[in-house]
Image: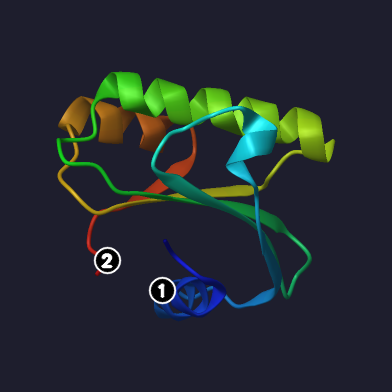
Amino acid sequence: MVDNKVLADLMNKKGYIFKSAKIIDKKLLATRKKVDIFMCVDTKKFYHIVFFTEQKSRFLLKNAQEVLMLEEKIKLLSMHNNKYKHLFIKEGICSKAKHFLEHIGWRVYNDFM
């Protein structure tokens, strides 16, 4: 479980400073995935969505599609689009999944913790 302090430290290392950050309850999204999701607003008032995932196996293309489905649910719940999308992965990631996410505008980080 990632908390606001860990989120602030990691994003500060990446060059982002947030004015506010709130965790999104997974029950609202009807998911049981091992993922922590934060909705954040930076100092320039841009919205960021930050996913932290921990799994025992590699992050594959099907996992990337599941993250996109969760993002769509969040868009419907929050009624706005997010300018920046970040994904932090603790285990390895498939190169196809990483390329797919980066191609559609996600920032993928595999170097935390």
Q: CA distance from mark 2 to mark 1?
A: 8 Å
Q: Which mark identifies residue 112?
A: 2
Q: Secondary structure at mark 1?
A: helix
Residue flagged by tag 1: what amino acid is it? Leu
Q: Residue 93 occupies which quadrant of the picture?
A: top left
Q: Which numbered disc flags the more N-terminal residue, 2 or 1?
A: 1
Q: Secondary structure at mark 2?
A: loop
Residues at badges 2 and 1 in contact (C-beta under 8 Å)?
Answer: yes
Neighbour tally class for label 2: few under 14, some 14-19, many 20 plus, Cα within 10 Å: few
Measuring 43% from the left and 45% from the top, which residue is drawn there? Answer: 35
**Closer to the camera in the image, 34 or 5:** 34
- The answer to whether residue 85 is seen in the rendering is yes
33 displayed left or right of 93: right
Q: Position of residue 5 (x, y in %)?
A: 51, 80
- The answer to whether residue 80 is seen in the rendering is no
Please give the residue where the numbered disc 1 appears in the rendered image. Answer: 10
Looking at the image, residue 73 lies above or below residue 111: above
**Closer to the camera in the image, 103 or 12:** 12
Looking at the image, residue 36 lies above or below residue 42: above
Q: Residue 29 occupies which quadrant of the picture?
A: top right
Looking at the image, residue 68 lies above or below residue 56: above
Residue flagged by tag 2: what amino acid is it? Phe
Looking at the image, residue 32 lies above or below residue 46: above
Q: Position of residue 7 (x, y in %)?
A: 49, 71
